[in-house]
Image: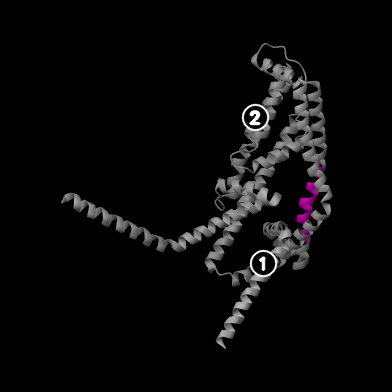
Amino acid sequence: MEKEGMSSKYFFIALVIITAIASVFVALPFFTSIIAGTILAYIFYPSYKWMKKHIRSESLTAFITAVIIVLLVTVPAGFLIKDLTQDTRYMYLRAKQQIFSGEFIESRCYDEGFLCKGVNTINDWMRDEEIKGYLLGVLNDVLTFVTGKISGIIFSLPKIAIHLLVVLFTTYYMLKDGKLLIARIASVAPLKVHHQEEILKQFGDIIYAVIYGSLIVALIQGLLGAFGLWLFGIKNFIWWSIVMTFFALIPFIGTWVVWLPASMVLLVTGYLQNEPGLIWRGLGLFFYGLIIISSIDNILKPILVAERARVHPLLILVGVLGGLFVFGAVGILIGPIILAILQKLLEIYEREQKPHVKEIHLDILGKTNHIKSIKTKKVIK
């Protein structure tokens, strides 16, 4: 009878493992969409709670919140893709025109200074047919890559629509039944209650840090950058502001990789063409970037994040870049979350093992001291 009970238990465990593995394979194509929906539900849960006070119905409130979230993501993305397509075409035609004309700077520079000589040398190189052919080849490769990506997005619209639907429903059910789901997972998870609470807190803190400490600050820097680039006459400012937003997410790099070269180009062009207006625009963009765009990071992060979620910059760097490569755009959030939870699990393990580790260290130390004392006695003899 006992043997039969054990067989039944092992069969049940095997069945659970098999169905769990099968479920993973079923959900795997929508993994990023499910994670994205879960994270969005967590971020917008305070808004959901506020709306629920006025609407009363949980289902209706969750549905309205989920639809608003999806619209907030998809509508701006559609406009950005449209603007990026137009900007890419303009930049391609402009670069092609400059390559054919052989002029890196649109007018020759007749000053005897080092800067003029350098620009004229580059212009002379660009008149070489072999260099022209190479540059045109590179330009065509870049255009093919960009148009391929844009075409891929257009042809993938049905697939994107399905993923958005999964995000919508995941967000809806996580808002409505998220607490119940967490409670059920916690009840079967083989972890102590205080460990579960620590992991959930780390999950919340890393989302808070990435969203408020990185993503929102990067978006604000991107908007300020777009305004500055437009104000000082930089063409394709929308495209460059998106690039600026991306670099703002990466620690140790930041927005200067866009505004600094842009200001230098204005200054150099103004000097070579003897146009004070361009020089003043270059200086204006330089100081605007230095004082407004870059310093906003140091002002906003302490206000938004405060002491709640101090995350190591290396964790954010590896998490953001690795997450982007593995999971795509949503990896900006998923990457740091995975690394932060791993860090917390290692901390819990270290803390739980500390008594054992201390005993080992003391044992090793005792043996070492014992060996030293024996050697000392031998030397004395």
Counting from the top left corner in percent of width and height, residue 288 is at 66, 32
Q: Residue at x 60, y 47 (%)?
A: 318
Name the quadrant containing residue 360.
Answer: bottom left
Counting from the top left corner in percent of width and height, residue 169 is at 76, 62
Q: From which residue to which does the magenta span run? A: 64-81
- Amino acid residing under circle 1: Ile
Mark 2, secondary structure of its residue: helix
* Contact? badges 2 and 1 (CB < 8 Å): no
What distance separates the C-alpha of mark 2 from that of mark 1? 56 Å
Q: Is residue 168 above or below residue 10?
A: above
The N terminus: image quadrant? bottom right
Q: Residue at x 21, y 51 (%)?
A: 376
Q: Is residue 72 magenta?
A: yes
Q: Is residue 124 above or below residue 372?
A: above
Counting from the top left corner in percent of width and height, residue 320 is at 63, 48
Is 149 left or right of 308, judged from the image as shown?
A: right
Q: Nearer the viewer, mark 2 or mark 1?
A: 1
- Residue 235 can be seen, yes or no: no
Q: Is residue 374 magenta?
A: no
Q: Main secondary structure of the magenta part?
A: helix
Q: Residue at x 82, y 45 (%)?
A: 151
- Amino acid residing under circle 2: Phe
Q: Which mark is residue 21?
A: 1
Of the residues under marks 2 and 1, which one precedes in the sequence?
1
Q: Residues within 10 Å of mark 2 (few under 14, many from 20)?
A: some
Counting from the top left corner in percent of width and height, residue 63 is at 78, 63
User: Given the current orientation, which residue lies at the most extreme bottom position?
Assistant: 1
Is 159 left or right of 332, judged from the image as shown?
A: right
Q: Which mark is residue 287?
A: 2
Q: Which mark is residue 151?
A: none
